[in-house]
Image (cartoon, helix red, strand yellow):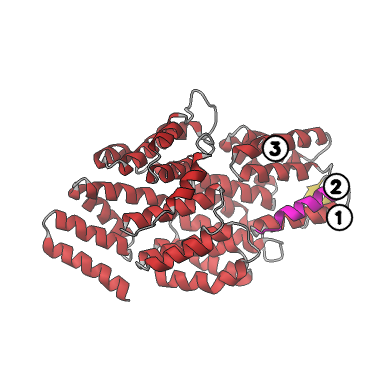
Amino acid sequence: MFKDERGLELTAASEAAVTHFDATINAYLGLRLDTGDHLKALFAADSSMPMAHVVNGYFFKLFCTPVLEAKALDRLASARALGGDITDREALHVEALDAWCRNDLVAATGRWEEILLDYPRDVLALRLAHFTHFYLGAADQMRDSIARVLPHWDEATPGYWYVQGFHAFGLEEAGDYAAAETIGREAVGKNPEDIWTTHAVAHVYEMQGRHREGVKWLTDLSANWGECNNFAYHTWWHLALYHLELEQFDAVLDLYDTRFRNVESDDYLDISNAVAMLWRLGEQGVNVENRWRELADKSETRINDHILVFADAHYVMALAADNRFDVAERLVGSMPDRISAQTTEAPIFEDIGRPLCESVIAYENGDFLKVMGLLAPLRYEIRRIGGSNAQRDLFQRLLISSAMKAGEFRYARALLSERTTLNPNGVWGWNRTAESLDGLGEREEAARARQAAKQLLAN
C-alpha cells in the first residue's frame, strides 16, 4: 500500500506507479494533451493497479460517445477482477464507475460525494462530481460540493489552485459573480495555465456583459493554452462570444475558422460550440455560407447516441439548419423515455429533450408559434439538460427570436425585460428590445433601447 501526493492510500505495485498515477490526475486537472501519455505510462508501470483501470474507465465515459461505452465496461470488469483487497475508498470508485456505466449519473455522483465526506482531498472524485453536477444542471450542488471540502485544502496541497478554480466556476453558475471573479482571478494568477479557471472568469464577463474586459482576459492568457486538450477550442469560443456581442462578426468567423472549428472534430463539445455559434450568427443576419454542412454530416452519424440531451439538441440544430429534417426527426423519434431506459437522462430526454428538439426543427421550418408552444413551458426546466448558463442561452434566444418572428411582441418584450434587467450591458438584448417595441408601436421607447445598444458598442 502506497500513498498519493495528497496522502490517500493507493493499492499499487510500486512507488513509480503512484508517481505516474499522480501525473495522470494532475494532467487531467489541467485538461492537458498529455493526459493519455501519463495514463499509458501508469499502465506500463503497473497494469494490475485497480485505480488505473477505474481512471481509464472514467476517461472513456467522459468522451460521451457510444463507441467508448464498451471500453469503459471492460475497464470496470478489470477493476473488479483486480479489486479483491483494496481500500474502501477505491471500492467506492469502482461502484461509481459501475453506476456511470449504467448511465446512472445520480448514483455515480452520490458515490463520489460519499468518498469526499471521508476523503475530502480525493481530487479525482471532486472533479468528476463537478462534471456530473454540471451536466445535471445542478449549479448550487456544483458550488456546494467544492465548498464542503475547502477547509481540508490549503496552498501546500498539490492541486489547491485547481480546486479554487472549481469553486469559482460553481459560484459563477450559481450567480455569485463577484466571488467567482475574485477567487478565479487569484487562482489563475497562481496557475496561469489553468484553462478551466480561466474559462470560469470568462463566464463572469459574459454573464455581466463585460465583453471588452473578456476579450482582454482571454487574449492575454491564450499563450498558455498550447498544451491543453480540445477544451482550448471551447475557450476560444468564449472569446468569439464577446466579439459576437460587440457585432464584430468578421472576428467571430475568423475565430470559428482558425481556432475552434479548424479541426472539424466530432467531439460533442466541439460540435456544440460550432453549432451554437453558427445559429447565433445566422439569427443576427450573418451569412455563414456552407459551414453548416460538415456539422450536419458529423451530427448525422450521432443520431442514435442519446447519451446527453445537451449534445442531442445541438445535433438536431445542425441537421435542421442544413435542411435534413428527416434525419432530425429520426433522432427525435429514437430518443429514450423513462419507461424503456432506466437511466438518469431518460426522463430528461422525455420531458425536455424531445420538445426542445422539436422546437428547434419547428424554428427552421418557420413554425414560430409551434416553437413558442413547445419551448415557453420549458423555460425554467432547460437547466436540466446541463451545460452552462451561457451555453443554454442559445435556447432562450431561440424562444425570443420565435416570438419576434411570430409577431408576439408583447411576449418578446416581457422576455427581453427580464434579460436587460439581469444584464443591462447586452447589445443583443437592447437591439431585440427595440425591435419588439417597434412592433408594439412604441417608437420613443424603441429609440431609447436602440440608443442603449449603440452606446454599449461605442464605449
Amino acid on which the number 2 mark rests in the picture: Asp
Q: Look at the numbered disc 3 and give the secondary structure of its residue.
A: helix
Q: Look at the numbered disc 2 and give the secondary structure of its residue.
A: loop
Going from the N terminus, do you reach mark 1 or mark 2 first?
1
Q: Nearer the viewer, residue 345 or 177?
A: 345
Gap in angstroms between the C-alphas marked 3 and 2:
19 Å
Within-10-Å neighbours for mark 3: few <14, some 14–19, many 20+: some
In the shown orientation, is residue 429 left or right of residue 152? left
Going from the N terminus, do you reach mark 3 or mark 1 first?
1
Report if residue 104 is visible in the image. Answer: yes
> What span is in magenta?
32-46
Q: Quadrant of residue 89?
A: top right
Within-10-Å neighbours for mark 2: few <14, some 14–19, many 20+: some
Q: Is residue 45 magenta?
A: yes
Whether pointer 1 and pointer 2 mark residues with C-beta atoms closer than 8 Å, the reply is: yes
The circle drawn on residue 16 is: 1
Q: Residue at x 63, y 50 (%)?
A: 126
The circle drawn on residue 424 is: none
Q: Quadrant of residue 368?
A: top left
Q: Look at the numbered disc 1 and give the secondary structure of its residue.
A: helix
Q: Residue 351 in the image: x percent, y percent?
A: 41, 33
Front tag of 3 and 2: 3
Amino acid on which the number 1 mark rests in the picture: Ala
Q: Which residue is mark 3?
A: 71
Q: Residue 456 in the image: x percent, y percent?
A: 30, 71
Gap in angstroms between the C-alphas marked 1 and 2:
9 Å
